[in-house]
Image (cartoon, coloured by chain):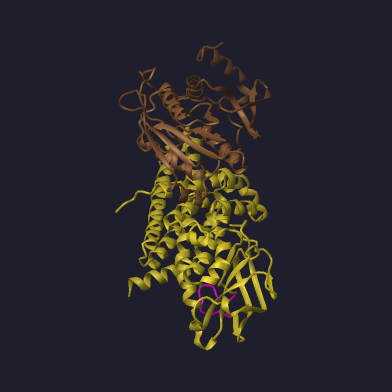
Chain colours: A yellow, B brown
Amino acid sequence: MNFEFTEEQLMIRQAARDYAQRELIIDVLERDEKMIYPARHIKNLAELGFLGMLVDSRYDGGGMDTISYVLAMEEISKVDASVSVIMSVNNSLVCYGIQEYGTEEQKEKYLKPLARGEKIGAFLLSEPEAGSDATSQKTTAEDKGDYYLLNGTKNWITNGNTAGTYLVVAQTHPELRHRGINVFIVDRHSPGISVGPHEDKMGMRSSDTHSVMFNDVKVPKENRIGEDGFGFKFAMKTLEGGRIGIAAQALGIAAGAYERAVQYAKERKAFGTEIANHQAIAFKLADMAVKIENARNLCLKAAWLKDNHKPFGVASAMAKLYAADIAMEVTTEAVQIHGGYGYVKEYHVERLMREAKLTQIYEGTSEIQKIVISRDVLK
Amino acid sequence: MKILVCISNVPDTTTKIVIGADDKNINTAGIQWIINPWDELALTRALELKDAGKISEVVVANVGTAITEATLRKSLATGADRAIRVNTEPADAWTVASNLSEVVKNEPFDIILCGIESSDHNGSSVGGLLAGMLDLNFISSVSGLDIENEKLTVQREIDGEKEILETQGPVLLVIQKGIAIVPRIPSMRGIMQARTKPLQIVEATSSESMTETVQVTLPPEKGKCKMIDAENAGEVIRLLREEAKVL
């Protein structure tokens, strides 16, 4: 066992921390309130290499390991989960999926601009009636010989409007059910694509979430990823890795709220002393610290397994389930420690609490993670 | 033109300082080391000038033991072309300056940048000493630097005003805040490239120091703050007179 980080990993953590604490913090409240997309930050993070940090340097990525990614995601999420979800979707769903399963031509044409952050990616799996049950895809991709014709609607699409490149999951052979599903690389500006309004979300309001409609959208045959019918397996495999990113995001949200709670508890006085000196508050902080440390260790273990090419699906499900649940608990306690101040926007913890809730829902709900884990337990 | 940026390795500015058992040093256990903030701004400006094509090479140098290499590699990750570490304990400003002077004697630089002070010892001495040892042109409190056709335009902060000077290399500039807006953050690519950039270790030519630390102590704890209601202003006068005894 070795719990030491490398010099590079520490540098990446510090770089992410510096950017978050110096830059993201400046306008995070305004962007959250007014649902402003963080365009300037995404451009800066792209230049620093965070948007393609997991991609091999051959394809213009950072060539970093998943442990570095967890460290960076935690630091960015401590301040702004709207930015970290954009980073997560681009890195661990879209770039990872194309790098792992795409052809050389697809990597040259689509992966490189995504890794450089010149284009942003979106992953279009969820539908109005296909969330956790991803096999029930209603979007169709009809095989027309030298192209596919896409029709249908996708829901809750992170980067739905700003993305330049979509990965779209659609049904080609309904009779084969999930074995008939394919995944396609689709240019967001293809004729026939329309994007719905920006969803007015509870949290992560600065990231742009939209419905995306496909109306007779032609997709070249060479834009299909993998063999005919590979789409469902592709989605499940990609989401395994994606969970590590969202687990690290939940960890960061929890840690961000905890750090604010510790600072506040040392400053705020009640009954003649700082509230940190009251056991009621000190014990809350102790419980929060243990939960965060557990979540961090689960995230890092899942990342280590992935980096060492060992099966990581169950570990990433455990990390996401636990980190998302404790993010909700820790942020709620952080609001409680702040009292009335915690309930107003200026102190950030109510925003972190709103952000935490989404981590229990997207990229596989907590209940889906329990299915993954229990199937492994009972196999 | 070549720039040398002198780098101090200092504890993170949020470190809670604990005095070591010998009462002469701080306890370094668990400390996170960073580039001295003024040096980091100097490095940022040097890199900006290189990006603008006005500088051909940015070199960083540090006097310190192996513990400082993480800081030097971060400088390389941020964009410096190479690093030099003079292998000795930076006992005082004299030790640091005399060893840095040997670096410059071996390899001349057009511009040498030193932070105005280090955030740990606040000595504010190395830049001046180094310029003296090298018999170099020397400008202090520099908050702006530009280069056109080998001519340097230097901005200084003086009492309530800004002063603009022109000079040319070789010159040693002592850097104040303002030289760069925010320190540059290393990119992923830079972090990867830092592994392969040269980090040269040279042995110290001198370990002589001119001062000896006898004792370091923490400042006294701040007294407890007393809150007095606004309508009870007379009580403030009484406390200042009878307790604080300042009236």
Q: Is the magenta stretch mostly helix, strand or loop?
A: loop
Instruction: Give the left or right position of residue A257, taking residue A219 as reference.
Output: left
Instruction: Give the left or right position of residue A366, taking residue A25 as reference.
Output: left
Magenta-colored stretch includes residue A131: yes
Q: Where is residue A284 in the image (x, y as percent from the top left)?
A: 42, 47
- Residue at image position (60%, 27%) is B142
- Above or below A238: residue A34: above
Magenta-colored stretch includes residue A292: no
Q: Position of residue A226 (x, y in %)?
A: 50, 77
Q: Report the front residue among A82 and B39.
A: B39
- Residue at image position (69%, 76%) is A192
- Residue at image position (40%, 36%) is B68
Looking at the image, can residue A225 be seen? yes
- Above or below B134: residue A262: below
- Above or below B212: residue A42: below
Looking at the image, can residue A337 be seen? no
- Numbered circles on residues, count: 0
Q: Report the front residue among A72 and A323.
A: A72
Instruction: Give the left or right position of residue A248, taking residue A129 as reference.
Output: left
Q: Report the front residue among B23 and A225.
A: A225
Q: Position of residue A177 (x, y in %)?
A: 50, 84
Q: Report the front residue among A229 and A327.
A: A229
Farthest-out residue, bottom: A175
Q: What quarter of the picture does the C terminus of chain B occupy?
A: top right
Instruction: Give the left or right position of residue B172, taking residue B19 as reference.
Output: right
Q: Position of residue B11 (x, y in %)?
A: 43, 34
Q: What quarter of the picture does the N terminus of chain B occupy?
A: top right
Span of residues in magenta: A128-138
